[in-house]
Amino acid sequence: MRYDSLDGWLHWLESLRIVRVPDDAFFRAQKIAQQLHLFPDHSTVITVGGTNGKGSVVAVLESIYNASNYRVGAYTSPHLFSFNERIKINDKPVEDSKIVEAFQAIDECRKDESLNYFQFATLVAFLLFKQSDLDVWLLEVGVGGRLDTVNLIDPDVAVITQVGWDHCDVLGDTLEQIAVEKAGIMRKGKPVIVGEEEIPDVLFSKADALKAPLLMQGRNFQYEALNAEWSWHSTRTRLDHLPMPKVLLQNASTALMAIDVLQERLPVARIEIERGLERVKIFGRCTWIEVQGVNVLLDVAHNPSATPFLLHYLKARAVSGKKYAVVGMMQDKDIAGALQIFKGTFDEWFLTSLPKPRGANCEQIQSALKACSIEKTHCYENPMKAIDAAFKQATSGDWVVVFGSFHVVAAFPYRRDAMNRVSTLRKQ
């Protein structure tokens, strides 16, 4: 065995520094999947792609199907605090020992074939799901869709949450090109659910070519918020007085459409939908925490399609007190495009560098903000120093909004002992 601990495997994978791999890498991973027969025999597969909202859609599906007592595997990325978050079975992260065994099996099978971190992780998830005899596989696409390792598995339902600007260096520099990559998860004759009302024409033409029924938000299904509850309906189902979930209703609505089209195969009762919506949780998406009177908002909004919702969330709560932003970004993101809408929102910005090769340094973020006429910024070499500086500045009633890359949100000391450290910092 190469390593006998999960940390050992992860450090080794990170040391490879293979961030992007050639197109033929998809077919290398495919060969390994075929040799180990990692494809589900009878499980229902829902693959979720799109620019934003993928994690929320998977979280809603996972919560509802778990509430219905199905055996559910959910594969998502990236993780916030531990690698195990990426691979869950029946709402529990898989334990280290099983992941280590799966890493070893993939490593032995691949021989000299090169794989990156994400490909290794995805093949490990497939192996663990296959061994667990699941009813449902929920697979979140990493980047794009067509050549994403997740796309090795044929879905019974493909979900495309939205098509926006992200990973342009890999997917293309027009929305049509990006949509082509995301449309790659469609399959012949299988339903495609789109979570927004306006989509590039290429999605229609791709679905037509595959004779895949395309179901769109606002056309084939829709929702309406009504104070503390909401309603949802498709052409055949109506659900009124639903409990509010802790995710964007647009994404919850998209998940309900997937459940609706699979009702004959995976029946779900209304009471189970309600229970699932009440229980759904996804840390790091508009997550609010209070630390000795300071309001902390954590959000992994990191591109121009995600940050408007964060801004809307802040405005909807009529936030009083001063507002401080703690931000870290990846350099392959549209940093200026993501942050320019916050002009005039924050009193001060605390910017952090993130690790190379993908992480942007704080000077890059500072330059992008300056181009947007945002001036009051401070630079720090790592997320914890930026968070510490923001908390030293904040007083009771103020807001510290930690957002951007998963890496900066994951750095927030959410555990009780670490929270005490942050509280102590405020008194200094």
Image (spheres, rainbow, N blue to C red):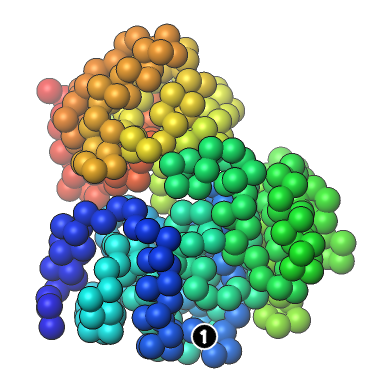
Other residues around mark 1 within 10 Å, as few (<14) / some (14–19) / many (≥20): many
The C terminus: image quadrant:
top left
Q: Residue at x 52, y 28 (%)?
A: 311
- Residue 173 on image: x %, y %: 53, 38
Residue type at mark 1?
Pro
Please name the residue that numbered disc 1 is placed on: 40
Q: Residue at x 38, y 88 (%)?
A: 35
Is residue 281 shown to the viewer in this render?
Answer: no
Of 144 and 326, nearer the camera is: 144
Check the image and report above or below for 57 versus 391.
below
Of 11 and 292, nearer the camera is: 11
Q: How many marks?
A: 1
Q: Is residue 277 left or right of residue 115?
A: right
Dividing the picture into quadrants, the one containing residue 294 is top left
Check the image and report above or below for 383 versus 210.
above
The N terminus: image quadrant:
bottom left
Q: Is residue 223 left or right of residue 102?
A: right
Is residue 198 shown to the viewer in this render?
Answer: yes
Q: Residue at x 72, y 59 (%)?
A: 206
Q: Secondary structure at mark 1?
A: loop
- Residue 396 on image: x %, y %: 32, 23
- In this view, the residue farthest toward the right is 235
Q: Residue at x 38, y 17 (%)?
A: 369
Of 387 and 20, nearer the camera is: 20
- Residue 181 on image: x %, y %: 57, 54
Q: Is residue 248 left or right of residue 233?
A: left
Check the image and report above or below for 58 versus 99.
above
Dividing the picture into quadrants, the one containing residue 156 is bottom right
Q: Is residue 11 left or right of residue 339?
A: left
